[in-house]
Amino acid sequence: MNDALSNIIVPVLYLLSAVLFIFGLKGLTRVRSARRGNALAALAMLIAIVTTLLDLGMVDYQWIIAGLIVGGLIGAIAAIKVEMTAMPEMVALFNGFGGGASALVALSIVWKELVEPAYAGSAAEALGGASAITAFLSILIGSITLSGSFVAFLKLSGKIGGQPTLLPARHAINSLFFLGCLAAGIYIGFFSTEPSSMITGALVATIISLILGVLMVIPIGGADMPVIISFLNSLSGLAAAMTGFVLSNNVLIISGALVGASGLILTQIMCVAMNRTLSNVLFSGFGQEGGSADAGEYGTVRSYSPEEAAMVLETVESLVIVPGYGLAVAQAQHTVKELADLLQKRGVKVSYAIHPVAGRMPGHMNVLLAEADVPYEQLIEMDTINPEFKTTDAVLVVGANDVVNPAAEKDPSSPIAGMPVLQVWEAQTVMMIKRSLSPGFAGIKNELFEYDNNMMVFGDAKKVLQEIVSEVKSLIAAA
């Protein structure tokens, strides 16, 4: 491309891409506009890629086209085939790949600018002090994001235990690894003048960062996965922004900063929703006693059949459905929608109470219910729905536990004390569909199981809901 023309078109296209990223991110803040926001962000990325290729000029398009085809196919197949229950795992993987890509770009800069030409000087002399620092930060943050995200993926997919793995003196070990990585970065940035020592130092920093990512995430339990996923998303954005500084690419800096900032804001929202701090999530090992509560800790628990539950639901005028991870595991979103439709035809007011950290990632329940075509206006956030429980006839809790535990408000000594929860116990009747009396991720007893107005309906969520739907249809036909 003509240099004069390039100097005009490239900045304009980069600006257009940045604006589309901003509007896309804005669209993702609402369920109703999320698809449009995702499409705008995808278009922004396409424009950024094409513009970068035009700006680079002479490049080997064979490798680029091959990469686009292979990467596009992998992404398309993954998006089509992934189950809703596996969506958190896929998000974790995407975060990891984003961080890994940033680290690889930084390593390629070290190789191309320092090692390959056998540059006789430090990285700071060759790249500039700021670029040398940001290249190291790309390696550090990107590698931590890569390995940490893969640990999150393994925990979410059940391939390794979801409970925290607490190593002795883990904080001291992590500090030593971080200092070691920092020392390697300073050495290759400002002191090393030999190409061989530079690449060795870069690889050492990468390996230490990968280990540090594992050590940071492995002590984090399943209850904190929504927080750690959004935090890793933030780190992947920061790694991309650092890479943008190394490459002097404005759109990469802007898009990376947007992802980093939005991920950090979302992380804070998740922490507030759990009455935790980010440092508490990262360093406390919360949930190490997970699974300690069992059926023997409960007194009077009333068990009901799907037929009895259907008889209650057939008489109510208002119903609030509380979805949890158990709903996703059972793939029961379509069945719960069918039940809601049946009741709505009889004049029942149906709404869904959405807790910010229900499920395994931020917005998990919103996405799950959207797949079943649940109307957006029926999805009510926690702060809005809580005052309405006192006037609600029945609440149907499907696969949720900790987010409806009264201990958060009534037991100051509870591990989840102060955590904002859905106050379902204030409704006239509560029905909880669960496989057993096993605890949630917090690993503590849920006294709601013993409440006089609570009905426990045990079994797989989808099968139980199918039986309830069948019974409701029978009652309607007999009326």
Image (spheres, rainbow, N blue to C red):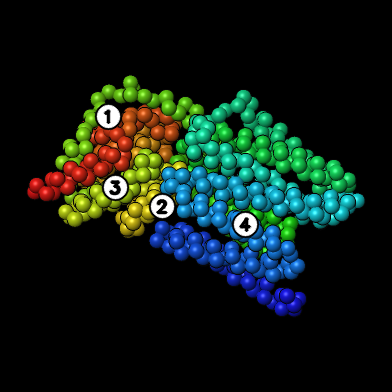
Element type at marker 1?
A: helix
Query: Label for residue 450?
Result: 1
Q: Which residue is mark 4?
A: 256
Do tag 4 and tag 2 residues touch (Cβ < 8 Å)? Answer: no
Q: Circle 1: is it few (<14), some (14-19), or many (20+) Cα within 10 Å? A: some
Residue 180 on image: x %, y %: 75, 36
**In this rendering, would 393 be left or right of 240?**
left
For disc 2, the neighbor class at 10 Å (few under 14, some 14 to 19, many from 20) is some
Q: CA distance from mark 4 to mark 3?
A: 40 Å
Residue 253 against residue 394 in the figure, above or below: below
Between discs 2 and 3, the one toward the N terminus: 3
Q: Give the mark, 4 or 3, whose residue is nearer the N terminus.
A: 4
Residue at the image position 54 percent from the left and 54 percent from the top: 75
Q: Is residue 9 visible?
A: yes
Residue located beneath label 2 in the image:
367
> Going from the N terminus, do you reach mark 1 or mark 3 first?
3
Tag 2 secondary structure: helix
Q: Which residue is mark 3?
A: 335
Tell whether label 3 touches label 1 (CB within 8 Å).
no
Labels 2 and 1: the sequence-earlier one: 2
Q: Position of residue 427 (x, y in %)?
A: 24, 42
* Lower sequence index among marks 4 and 2: 4
* Three-letter code for the amino acid on which mark 4 is drawn: Gly
Mark 4 secondary-structure assignment: helix
Tag 3: amino acid = Thr
Task: Give the number of the mark in front: 2 or 3.
Answer: 3
